[in-house]
């Protein structure tokens, strides 16, 4: 029998991609996620735990892919995330967005902004520009090119992987246990 060759794709990483964890960490996980996706919220919590356990070894490159439309479309929260990332508070933003997963209305987004204490003028300037929309379109195009079918979709070493839903599964997948410090 012929063995199926693993499909390796290059998922580009851009300077404006949000990175959670140590930017210099050698292990890079690229995650396509949506802020209104319960499975993304759960996976994000597991990845946060992994980063806490291996702070110098693992980082997450977050590719926000707005696919949800109910009860609120997630394009706007993704735009906020892009602009808040410019102020270095993306990780906190995603945590608050995931806490409000079913109610990402304009009012909730504004409450999150107040809680994060971001520079409101810079946020409004960013939201009024086109960079955030261009970024979201670029992520959508990349997702299509690398054949993302659902969220969360995760890549490690440019290979799509079935994301384990426990930290120990990630440790095995990434070979972190045998190299623990």
Image (cartoon, rainbow, N blue to C red):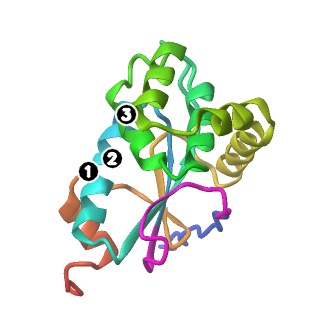
Whether 170 is drawn above or below 121: the answer is below
> Residue 56 versus residue 30: which sits nearer the camera?
56
Whether 91 is drawn above or below 172: the answer is above
Say which quarter of the image contains residue 69.
top right
Residue beneath label 3, please? 96
Instruction: State the mark number for residue 89.
Output: none
Q: Is residue 113 left or right of residue 180?
A: right
Q: Is residue 68 left or right of residue 51?
A: right
Instruction: State the mark number for residue 165.
Output: 1
Label 2 Cα crowd, 10 Å radius (few <14 / some 14-19 / many 20+): many
Does the magenta stretch mainly form a helix, a strand or a loop? loop
Q: CA distance from mark 3 to mark 1?
A: 21 Å
Contact check, label 2 and label 1, Cβ < 8 Å? yes
Dot 3: what SS?
helix
Q: Earlier in the sequence, mark 2 or mark 1?
A: 2
Residue at 24% in and 57% down: 49
Contact check, label 3 and label 2, Cβ < 8 Å? no
Label 3 Cα crowd, 10 Å radius (few <14 / some 14-19 / many 20+): many
- Eye-nearest disc, 3 or 2: 3
Residue beneath label 2, please? 43
Residue at 52% in and 53% down: 88
**Residue 18, image x, y percentages:** 55, 54
Q: CA distance from mark 2 to mark 1?
A: 6 Å
């Amino acid at each position: 029998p012929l063995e199926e060759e693993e499909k390796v794709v290059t998922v580009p990483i851009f300077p404006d991609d949000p990175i959670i964890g140590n930017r210099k960490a050698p292990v890079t996980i690229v995650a396509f996620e949506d802020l209104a996706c319960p499975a993304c919220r759960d996976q994000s919590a597991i990845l946060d735990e992994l980063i806490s356990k291996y702070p110098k070894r693992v980082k997450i490159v977050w590719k926000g892919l707005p696919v949800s439309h109910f009860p609120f479309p997630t394009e706007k929260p993704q735009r906020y995330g892009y602009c808040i990332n410019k102020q270095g508070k993306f990780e906190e933003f995603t945590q608050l967005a995931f806490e409000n997963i079913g109610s990402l209305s304009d009012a909730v987004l504004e409450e999150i902004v107040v809680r994060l204490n971001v520079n409101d003028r810079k946020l409004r300037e960013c939201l009024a520009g086109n960079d955030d929309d261009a970024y979201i379109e670029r992520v959508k195009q990349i997702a299509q090119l690398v054949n993302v079918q659902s969220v969360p979709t995760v890549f490690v070493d440019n290979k799509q992987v079935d994301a384990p839903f426990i930290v120990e599964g990630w440790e095995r997948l990434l070979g972190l246990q045998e190299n623990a410090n």
